[in-house]
Amino acid sequence: MKLDSIGRYISSIYRHQSILINKYFEKYGFGSGQYIFLINISKNEGINQKQLSENVKIDRANTNRAIKKLEKLGYIYTVEDKEDRRSRKSFLTEKGKEIIPLVIKDLANITEIMAQGMDDNQREKLLELLQLIEKNIMLEVDNIRKDKCK
C-alpha cells in the first residue's frame, strides 16, 4: 500500500493556517511570525530570549526579530536581566495585555475551523499523532546536529 506524504499535508496545513493567522492578526500589526512569541511571553512574564526560543522551538535570530517587532508595536517591552547583563527579559505592556484575550479567541476560532467535522475522540487521537510526529522529527534533527558537531 502506497502512503501519501505526511509532510505534504503538514506543509499545506501550515501554509493555509499562516494565511488565516495573518488575516486575523493584521488588525494588530503582526502575523504568523510573531503571535506565538506574544502568547508565550503572556504565559511567562519576564522570560529571556534563550528560554523563549526553546519554548517556541524557533532559533534565536527569528526570536530576536519577533521581539523587536512586538516592541515596536508597543505590545511588549524588554529589560536587562540584573543577574546576566547579556540577557534581556520580556514583559507585556498594558496594550499587550489588552489584546491577549482577543488573540486567544482568534486562535480558538482557527482551531475550530481546522477541526470541523471531528468528534472529541478524533481530535484527541490527531493531537497524539501530531505529538508523535513532532517527537520523531525533533529527535532526527537533534541526531543530525550531533553528527555535525563530531
Image: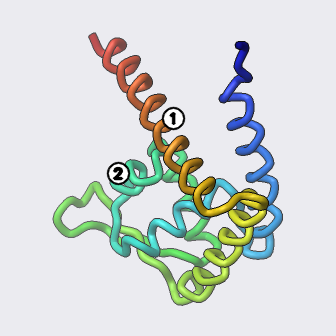
**In the figure, is residue 75 to the left or right of 88?**
right
Q: Which mark is residue 50?
A: 2
Disc 1 target residue: 133
Label 1: which secondary element? helix
Q: Is residue 34 above or below residue 2?
A: below
Nearer to us in this view, 146 or 96: 146
Viewer-nearest of labels 2 and 1?
A: 1
Label 1 packing within 10 angstroms: few (<14), some (14-19), many (20+):
some
Nearer to us in this view, 72 or 134: 134
Percent position (x, y) of residue 138? Answer: 43, 32
Percent position (x, y) of residue 92? Answer: 48, 79
Nearer to us in this view, 63 or 19: 19
Q: Image quadrant for the N terminus?
A: top right
Q: Amino acid at mark 2?
A: Lys
Q: Quadrant of residue 81?
A: bottom left
Q: Is residue 39 above or below residue 11?
A: below
